[in-house]
Amino acid sequence: MALEQEFHSIDVTSSTSTVAIEGVDTQNLPKLPPAGKSQTQWQQVSQFLEQFPDNLNRFWQAYQLPLIAVVVVLAATVTLRVAIAILNAINDLPLLEPTLELIGIVYSTWFVLRYLLQASTRQELWAEIRVLTAQVLGD
């Protein structure tokens, strides 16, 4: 069983549209613009490239804060992942993990004994925190 369709020749110089295959509904098919009014592809690319800086500037002005927020979140995520990878690599070294844990326990014990047990030393710590906060944030 062979598929038989009749094809008609199309006169490309004619301004009237001609159906190539009989019995096909061409109402919903996309149509090309007339050849005389269309731009070449290179002209369209050239026009796009000429307008690109202006379009990019308008996009930046419209979405500046959300773009900065996305960049900050991505940078924080990448930094956190790198820091975790470095810490995991350090933890995998023999005897380094228990040594660092011991250093942390000793420092925490010293901090509690030095600053948190007596009221006068707690006030001293609080005063240092206020001075540091004022230096960082301003008066």
Image (cartoon, grey):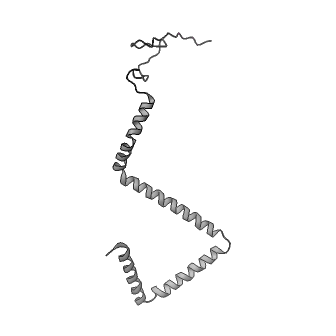
The quadrant where residue 90 appears: bottom right
Residue under the image location 40 percent in, 37 percent down: 48
In the rendered view, tell whether residue 137 sits above or below residue 28. Answer: below
116 vs 86, left or right, is left
125 is within the stretch colored magenta: no
In the rendered view, tell whether residue 28 sits above or below residue 8. Answer: below
For the stretch drawn in magenta, the main secondary structure is loop
4 is within the stretch colored magenta: yes
The number of discs equals 0
133 vs 90, left or right, is left
Give percent across and percent down for residue 79: 51, 62
Indicate the quadrant containing the N terminus: top left, top right, bottom left or bottom right. top right
In the rendered view, tell whether residue 26 sits above or below residue 134. Answer: above
The quadrant where residue 86 appears: bottom right
Give percent across and percent down for residue 94: 68, 72
Give percent across and percent down for residue 102: 60, 79
Residue under the image location 58 percent in, 63 percent down: 85
The quadrant where residue 49 appears: top left
Give percent across and percent down for residue 76: 47, 61
Of all residues, the one furthest to the right in this rendering is: 94
Indicate the quadrant containing the C terminus: top left, top right, bottom left or bottom right. bottom left
Which is more toward the observer, 11 or 45? Answer: 45
Residue under the image location 45 percent in, 58 percent down: 73
Which is more toward the observer, 15 or 101? Answer: 15
Residue under the image location 42 percent in, 88 percent down: 121
In the rendered view, tell whether residue 113 sits above or below residue 1. Answer: below
Q: Provide the residue span drawn in magenta.
A: 1-6
